[in-house]
Image (spheres, grey):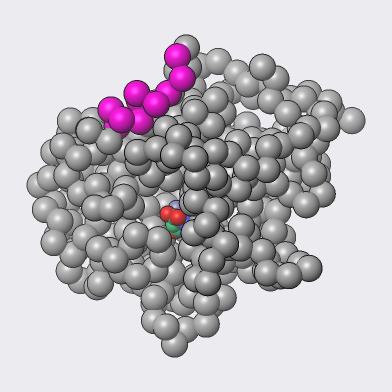
Amino acid sequence: MTDTITIRRPDDWHVHFRDGAMLQSAVPFTARQFRRAIVMPNLVPPVTTVDAARAYRDRISMAVPDGIDFEPLMTAYLTDTIDAGELARGAEEGVFTAVKLYPAGATTNSDSGVTDLKKVTDVLECMQAVGLPLLLHGEVTDPEVDIFDREARFIEQKLIGLRADFPELKVVFEHATTKDAVDYVLSQDSHMGCTITAHHLVINRTDIFKGGIRPHLYCLPIAKREVHRQALRAAATSGDKRFFLGTDTAPHPVHEKESDCGCAGIFSAPTAMQVYTQVFDEAGALDKLEAFASINGPGFYGLAVNEGTVTLVRDVVEVPERVETAEGEIVMVFRPDAGLNWRIMA
Ligand code: DOR
Ligand code: ZN
């Protein structure tokens, strides 16, 4: 049995840091585990300009603990009316690494998202031309569509057409939750990437109701049936270049999760690498962890892989249940029910 594993320093290709006090608490957890992270722009108001992204990047950098070398990679929030020139300038000036598309109303702070892909045709053309990747929240928003079918419908109704119209546009299918998404990505060329969260590798939809309703396991896209979780595990642990690590760590104050209408999001930053390592270990695929966590992502984005390494050790670890923010609010940390048995060596 392998009891330690050393890999190149990993990156997280999908995080939510928020702002203000929450940001101060959230950033150190990601910065301790990852060398770089793609930062989601769904603030209120959303990050839609180069200046806003630059200022947000500065606030994130200020929250990184001393002595830690961490680089936030910024994204722009695609709206119906965003200016293609602003995105091109942001890419040119090294501020925007990618652009995030939320279908309007799909999830937390997505009200300003895109209402119709036709409205952003010129923007997508510009992104294709300058090589700026499009990151997709891949769910349809039609309230008539069952919540468990929204990802599969998005592929049929939106993604297939989008790829046909913009074949050279780099597209990331973010936080895939279905076998449909995995099969679709596998059918595509190297312009298509896909991130997979730690929690979707661990929980299925039944877990959300294990012993009662579990608001801290609610996120979007919602976890699906076991057959889908198995497809995600096979994809992540395959070593295939199109799949890479993106936690979608999304902190919310506990009172907003444990409420009449609890919001979507799972805070996994403190446990992310430990959980991924455990999943790869269970799959007998520790030799593929480095590809998923540290190589495939930079390969897709056309960036260099990181210098330096991180070592994980098989060990029973205690994980704090809750993390306090500077304002005293608390967020719940994602932990597999069965416990964690890998830790990051200091
Ligand atoms: O569960 C989620 N939480 N899914 C998202 O797409 C957004 C995120 C958030 O910002 O809280
Ligand atoms: Zn997200």
- Residue 18 in view here: yes
In this rendering, the answer to whether 149 lies above or below 242 is: below
Instruction: Give the residues drawn in magenta, as a range.
Output: 57-66
In-image side of 306 versus 237 (left or right): left
In-image side of 280 versus 316 (left or right): left
In-image side of 134 versus 274 (left or right): left
Residue 27 inside the magenta-drawn segment: no
Q: Residue shown at 48%/75% (left/top)?
A: 150
Q: Residue shown at 40%/61% (left/top)?
A: 108
Instruction: Find residue 99 and report its horizontal and vertical position in percent.
Output: 29, 49
Residue 58 inside the magenta-drawn segment: yes
Q: Residue shown at 73%/70% (left/top)?
A: 212
Extreme residue toward the front, this view: 328
- Residue 243 in view here: no
Instruction: Find residue 178 and report its horizontal and vertical position in percent.
Output: 59, 66
In this rendering, the answer to whether 177 lies above or below 131 is: below
In this rendering, the answer to whether 329 lies above or below 150 is: above
| Chief SS of the magenta region | helix
